[in-house]
Amino acid sequence: MSMSDPLADMLTRIRNAVMVKFRSVDMPCSSVKVDVAKVLKDEGYIESYEIIKGSPLDTLRIVLKFGPDDEPVITGIKRVSKPGLRQYVKAKALPKVLNGLGISIVSTSKGVVTDKTARALNAGGEIICEVW
């Protein structure tokens, strides 16, 4: 059975792994998921990610990041644009997450970037998710 929203599945796997304090989480790999994982790593929300080659399909492994007292770095992650209702915004209308304490991940014509980078590039696009 095919999945209708693979990105929502990715975010749910990360959210569930953070709640039970797993150190890593595996999921089917796609180029958009790798782009989202790259943004999460660049912003310091995850330790690392790697692509594990497989015969039918590749697997994306995300190593989660925890603080010194074993508190998770990701306290919340939410899908914004859904297959049934896409959320497109212009660069000047990009919302701030928790007054700048969190990030929005935006798919623009210049790639998958954070809301701050999209504002700097003056590129709007589809808001994929919010992380805080």
Image (cartoon, grey):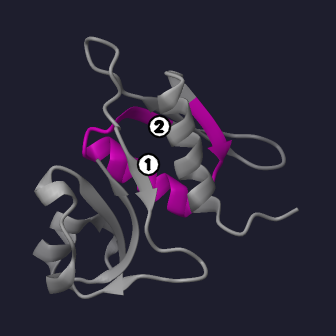
Instruction: Indicate the amino acid at tag 1.
Output: Ala
Residue extent of the magenta highlight = 25-49
Task: Please tell me whether mark 2 sits on a helix, a strand or a loop.
Answer: strand
Residue 26 sits inside the magenta stretch? yes
Residue sitting at x 63%, y 36%: 26
The residue sitting at 34% across, 38% down in the picture is 75
Indicate the position of residue 47 as horizontal and vertical percent values: 36, 30
For residue 21: magenta? no
**Marks 2,1: beta carbons within 8 A:** yes
Q: Looking at the image, can residue 45 be seen?
A: yes
Left or right side of 61 for 55: right
111, above or below 14, in the image: below
Seen at 64% across and 51% down, the residue is 29
Q: Is residue 84 above or below residue 120?
A: below
Q: Which mark is residue 37?
A: 1
Whether residue 30 is visible to the viewer of this picture, yes or no, is no
Dot 1, crowdedness within 10 Å: few (<14), some or many (≥20)?
many
- Mark identifier at residue 67: none
The relative height of residue 58 versus residue 19 in the rendered view (above or below) is: below
Residue type, mark 2 in image: Tyr
Taking depth in this image into account, of 98 and 124 the one nearest to the observer is: 98
Q: Mark 2 sits on what residue? A: 49
Q: Position of residue 11 (x, y in %)?
A: 52, 50
Res. 129 image quadrant: bottom left
